[in-house]
Image (cartoon, helix red, strand yellow):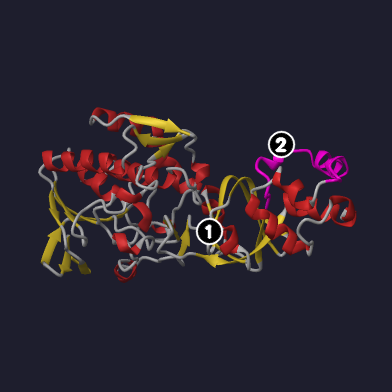
Amino acid sequence: MDIIIIGGGASGIFAAINLKKYNNNVRILEKNSRIGKKLLVTGNGRCNYSNINLSENNYNKPEFVKNAIDSFSNTDLVNYFKMMGLYSCVENNRIYPITLKANSVLSILMKKLSENNICINTDTEVLSVSKEKDKFKLITNKGEFYCHKLIVACGGSSMPKSGSDGSFFKILKKLGHKVTPIFPALTQIKLESAYLKHLQGTKVVGKVKLYSKEKLIIEKYGDLLFTSYGISGPPILDISVKLSEYNDLYIEMPLINYSDKIDKEEIFSSFYMFNDYSIDEFLLGLVDKKFIHYILETLGIKSNTPLNFLEKYYSDIIDILFNSKFYVKGTTGFENSQVTRGGVDISEVSPFDFSSKICDGLYIIGEALDVDGECGGYNLHFAFACAYTLSKNFNY
C-alpha cells in the first residue's frame, strides 16, 4: 500500500517508522531542506519528550487524547526509545534523552528511517490535494505524487521558521475539514509597564495568577523571568493559552521568592523591628535589588526614607511584595510559541486511529489537530502517541 506522510516532524517521522513495519510503501514529503527541524529546538534544544505525570488532564481536549496516551504511555515511549538505543533521564518530572540533546532523538529516529528504507523528499511543498477514486493526487513544487492513504502531520502555526506556518490548513479546508480559530500557545506574555527595561533579567520563584476583570482565570507556580517585553517562564507559558479567551487581563505575582512559605504578619512585624533601617536597606533582605526601584516608584516613596517615617505605607509595601499587578498586552506571537491552540476540529477525526470522518483514506495527527497540552513534554508525547496509535489501528 502506498502511504504518503506530509510533514517530517515528530509525529510524521514516528508514523513512518511504525507504518513501515507492516511492509507498506511509505514516503515523507517535507518542505524544509531537512526533517525534524522543530524537534531540534524543543525543550530549549534538550528535547523534553514526555512527563512522569502524564494524564489526559494535561490537555485542552482530555476525552479525545485519552485513548492515545493510554495506548502509548510515558513508560511505553521511554522503553520504545530504549529499544532503539536511546536512554532517558528525569528532571523535575520531565523526561529527556540522557544526553540532554534533541539531536540525539532526531539521530536515532533518522537511523530507523534509513534502516527501513523510507523515502524522504525534502524541499517538497504540497500545493494541493485532491481525491481521485481510491487515490489521492498531490501536486507539489517537485511534481505530482499519488497514494492510497494520506497522513497529514504538517504541524500548526507555531515557530513558522521551522516550517509549520499553518499554510496547510487551507488545503484541509478544501478537503472538507473545519479548522477552529488558531492562536499562539505556550508563549511569553507582553506586559504594560514602564519598568520592564529595568527589571529585565530578574527572576522570582512563586505563583502567578491571571485575572480578567478581577475574576481569577488560572494560576501556576514556578520560575518567573522578567524580560524587556514582559515576562516568561514555564508558568507563564501555561497561562498564555488563556489569553485568547478573555479581555481586560492582568497578572498578579510576588516579588519575594517562595512567598507562599512566608508569613505576611512576620514581615509586617519586622517593619517595627528594623525601624532604624532605610526602606532600601529593609528591602535588600527580601527582594532582588532591581525590584527596589520599582517598588519605591510605584508607591511614591523616596529612596533611603527611614522605615519609621513610612508607617502609613506598610500595608501597601506588603501588598506589592506579595501581589504585584501587571497589565497584559498580549503574547509574543506564533514566532515564539511552542504550540498552536486550535486546528482541525477533533469532532471530525477518530481518536482511535486518527482517521478523517470527512474524507476516506485521510489521517490527521499531531499539532494539526485542535489539541494542545501544558508545558513539560506533553505536546511532544502526544505527537509520538497519536502516530503510534494510528499505526496500530491503521485500516490496511
Res 136 quadrant in image: bottom left
Res 198 quadrant in image: bottom right
Magenta extent = 253-276
**Camera-nearest residue between 87 and 27:** 87
Q: Which residue bears the numbered disc 2?
A: 261
Assess whether residue 262 is covered by the magenta stretch: yes
- Dot 1 or dot 2: first in sequence order is 1
Q: Amino acid at mark 1?
A: Thr
Res 295 quadrant in image: bottom right
Q: Is residue 280 visible?
A: yes
Dot 1, how many residues are within 10 Å of its Cα: few (below 14), some (14-19), or many (20+)?
A: many
Assign the C terminus to one quadrant of the image.
top left
Q: Which residue bears the numbered disc 1?
A: 227
Determine whether label 1 and label 2 are within 8 Å by CB.
no
Q: Amino acid at mark 2?
A: Lys
* Residue 112 locus on image (x, y percent): 17, 39
Instruction: Describe the element under mark 1 as helix, strand or loop.
Output: loop
* Residue 20 locus on image (x, y percent): 16, 42
* Residue 151 locus on image (x, y percent): 25, 54
